[in-house]
Image (cartoon, grey):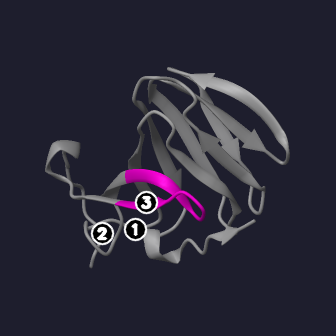
Amino acid sequence: MPSKPFVTAAALSAQEGWNEPDGRGVLTWQTLASNDVTPSEALTAGIVHLAPGGFLALHRHPPAEIYHVIEGSAVVTLNGTSQVVTVGDTVYIPPMTEHGIRNTTASLMRFFYVFPTNAFAEVEYQFS
């Protein structure tokens, strides 16, 4: 799909997810930019939703990634070190850094994510 400017709305994006408490995690996400669904290239972005107790298990992948917290708070783990992130915090995750995130609160947590890839399908998750 050729790249061109566009505007998308999270309210119109389909939700996908995993419900694997003993595996990849318990979360949903909405892909907002990925060249398999939008006329874009070079960046993939979306919003992850972590309900109370939701998580994305420890994993790594070749492309770098950014999380930007837009609602709630959670505990992010980067190479074995954990810290709380909250609204307004941005997390930079270098390539192949082991990382995961867990909502330990009683409220919804959401973060915006970005990969420097054409499509989400190009991100090869390697779970720990």
From the viewer's perspective, tell me whether residue 8 is left or right of residue 45. left
The residue under label 3 is 19
Task: Verify CB contact (< 8 Å) between mark 1 and mark 2.
Answer: yes
Screen quadrant of the C terminus: bottom right
The residue under label 1 is 41
Stretch in magenta: 17-28
Residue type, mark 3 in image: Asn
Q: Nearer the viewer, residue 35 or 81?
A: 81
x and y percent of residue 17 in the render? 38, 60
Task: Verify CB contact (< 8 Å) between mark 3 and mark 2.
Answer: no
Residue type, mark 1 in image: Glu
From the viewer's perspective, tell me whether residue 89 is left or right of residue 28. right
Number of other residues with Cα within 10 Å of mark 3, as a class: few under 14, some 14 to 19, many 20 or more? few
Q: Secondary structure at mark 2?
A: loop
x and y percent of residue 66 in the render? 59, 45
Tell whether position 25 is magenta. yes
Image quarter for residue 22? bottom right
The mark that comes first in sequence, 1 or 3, is 3
Tell whether position 125 is magenta. no
The residue under label 2 is 3
